[in-house]
Amino acid sequence: LRDLHARLPTGPDAVSFGLGMPSAELFPNAAYGRAVAQLLASDPKALQYALPSPVLKRHIVALMSLRGVTCSPDQVFLTAGGQQGISLLSRLFLDPGRVVVADEVTYEGFSAAIQPVRPRVLTVPVDADVGSDPDALQSLLRRGARPAFVYLIPDGHNPLGCSMPLDARRKFVALAREFQVLMVEDGAYGLLQYDEKPAPPLRALDDEWVCYVGSFSKILAPAIRVGWLVVPTWMIPLLSRTKQGEDLDVGNLNQCALATYLDAEDFPRHLERLRSEYRVRRDRMLAALKAHFPVGTRWNHPSCGFYIWCELPPGLDATERVDAAIAAAVSFVPGDVFRLGGRQLRGSMRLSFSTYAPNRIEEGIRRLGWVLHAVTDPGSPGHVGHVVVGGDW
Ligand SMILES: Cc1ncc(COP(=O)(O)O)c(C=O)c1O
């Protein structure tokens, strides 16, 4: 994915649906700037080494309660983003002899996090409408598999966009208890829900076997590099030791500026603004797909997060279309990039609807539709030989 990142079109009319970038227009630059300035003016130790901020932990407890999770500050562990949370848990619990279970199509950062510890990976099927299959996990466990943990993305799955129904969540939690297996619940998108009554996170159903991975990247700004884990208290000193070997602290300026920002601002209102803007973008992309993609393409209707998963009609290979799309100043990620196990996914693509304003989304999907139509109908004006970047689309 990083290779693709380096190749993405960058011109003024480029439209990238490739990366899970939050919308830059929704970053609270002014309010965050005020918080940083206030902190630097009032706290002479803001740039010093420091222990994790208790104020920030209390804010995180309040954020978790918005998701129906009851936890205490001594169950919160601060990280430099969700990715570090996954990596620390992997380093703590995995080694080459251990087994880890994940979806057969999953967040590529998970594969990157476990790679240095080289565990044995078992996968469960995952469906673009209803998410991970608890019955498949049950059968692995009944056949004797004893994973160190199971990695799940129940809300706004990356890359599939789906959210897990309540009964599947209950089944996963019941399996965790019955077989005493940890569930690592990646909640990177969990506060970006677009429907009325989302199902509760696994951590709201169990506080002993579920480790929740949270992040400010998608709900505030990724450059702040602050995330968190909610874990049983016995894990906190172990995580501290593992993290200290890596990078000592979460940058104190980032932690404290974030705490100052959260003290001053109405964060639930900021979240509501994000939800309503991303909901509009999702709907615009869904409508544009209907208008511009080849007949026979199928896609899902995500209720959370940044991604729509598309399955192209038979004969269309998403991986082979990457270069033509980049030439047309538009991009996507071919589904196969996210495959951890199972069958090939050459006919699938992940599209992010988060990055651009609705009109740019419409424009990008129109271009991508042309790039795809060029294969199904080589005489169409969208044939790659006819594409004029920045021309009259
Ligand atoms: C599912 C998932 N988990 C974790 C992350 C990590 O994000 P960060 O380290 O910026 O919090 C991402 C980022 O794209 C993600 O999609």
Image (cartoon, rainbow, N blue to C red):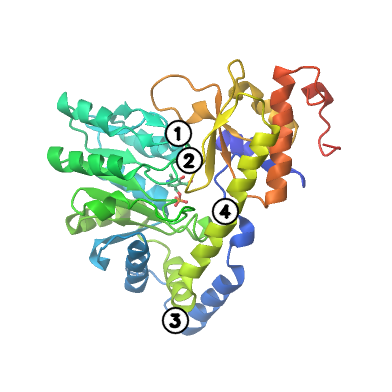
Real-space CA distance between mark 2 and mark 1, rounded to the nearest whole angstrom: 7 Å
Mark 4 or mark 2: name the one nearer the start of the chain: 2
**For mark 4, does the 10 Å Cα neighbourhood hold few (<14), some (14 to 19), or many (20 or more) residues?**
many
Q: Mark 2: few, some, or many residues within 10 Å (few <14, many ≥20)?
A: many
Q: Nearer the viewer, mark 3 or mark 4?
A: 4
Tally of numbered tags: 4
| Distance of label 3 from label 1 (alpha carbons) | 48 Å
Q: Regarding mark 2 in the picture, which secondary structure is present there? A: loop
In this orientation, which residue lies closer to the viewer: 200 or 327?
A: 200
Residue 128: numbered disc:
1
Query: Which residue corresponds to the image point at 67% horizontal and 30% vertical from the top-left?
Result: 293
Residue wearing tag 3: 43
**Is the CB atom of the residue marked by disc 4 within 8 angstroms of ligand 1's nearest atom?**
no
Q: In the rendered structure, which disc, 1 or 4, sits on the residue that comes first in sequence? A: 1
Q: CA distance from mark 3 to mark 4?
A: 36 Å
Q: Quadrant of residue 291?
A: top right
Disc 1 versus disc 4: distance between alpha carbons? 19 Å
Q: Secondary structure at mark 1?
A: loop
Residue type highlighted by circle 4: Tyr
> Quadrant where the N terminus lies?
top right
